Amino acid sequence: MQAMASSVNQEATEPTQGGSEWNLWLEFINRATREWASAHDWEELVKIFPPSVTSATQATVALPQDFEKLSEDVVLYDGNTTSGTAFPEVPINTTGLYNETDKYVSVMGNQSDGMNLIFHPATLSSGASILIRYYSAVTSLASPSQIPMVPDPEFVIDRATAFIFEGRSDTRFQQHEAKARERLLLMVENSELEKFSSYSNPQNVITTLRKRGFRMGRD
């Protein structure tokens, strides 16, 4: 808020907390955060959901309210294998292309009524564990003690400031919007590089064959 005020009001004093201007600026900050969240598959938004199977005939698992999409295969731990059984995601409208014994999951539902994960085959073992990694929806900020999930806070400042200037029909919004766009593209690039540029354990580019356990030239 102080950084935004330094550009908007030419003073490093944020609006009075709880006032109309404070609430408006807070909404702009949340809009900037949502814009960041929808621009890329950020690792910051990945969560783990570990539901348990409570019935021998259970085939549907209710997903968390903040579920957006799966980040990798769903893994079922039912005691058959120590590493678990992977269930890849299959679009619900293409399930007719698979056999009755094929293992896969499909996502059904919507954000209003809730999302569900449908397992195939339909019968799961009671007491089995499931590991679901998913991209979550970003949480809106409500108080000064909360911290945005955006890696570069300057993006939030520039984007929210652009919203303020745009609302005031101030042409300076274009400058701040351009700065925010550049910061967003840089964050996307850094997010991709982080997957392979670890100093402690550098990683090569992961292909779909490697994810399935195949080694080129050996398998």
Image (tube, rainbow, N blue to C red):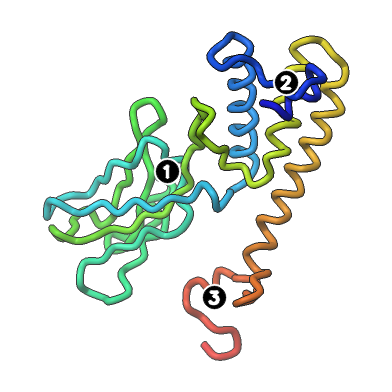
Q: Residue at x 58, y 48 (%)?
A: 41
Mark 1 or mark 2: whose residue is earlier in sequence? 1
Give the class, few, some or many, for how many residues have Cα within 10 Å of label 2's Cα (few <14, many ≥20).
Answer: many
Relative placement, left or right, of 196 versus 219 is: right
- How far apart marks 1 and 2 lie (CA) works out to 40 Å
Name the secondary structure under disc 1.
Answer: helix
Q: Residue at x 73, y 17 (%)?
A: 164
Q: Identify residue type, mark 2.
A: Phe
Query: Where is mark 2, residue-wise?
Result: 163
Q: State yes or no: discs 3 and 2 in contact (Cβ < 8 Å).
A: no
Query: Where is mark 1, residue-wise?
Result: 93
Q: Nearer the viewer, residue 96 or 152?
A: 152
Measuring from the top left, give residue 127's x and y in whole percent: 14, 59
Name the secondary structure under disc 3.
Answer: helix
Q: Residue furthest bottom?
A: 218
**Mark 1 or 3: the one toward you:** 3
**Mark 3 or 2: the one toward you:** 2
User: In which image quadrant can residue 123 be found?
Assistant: bottom left
Name the secondary structure under disc 2.
Answer: helix
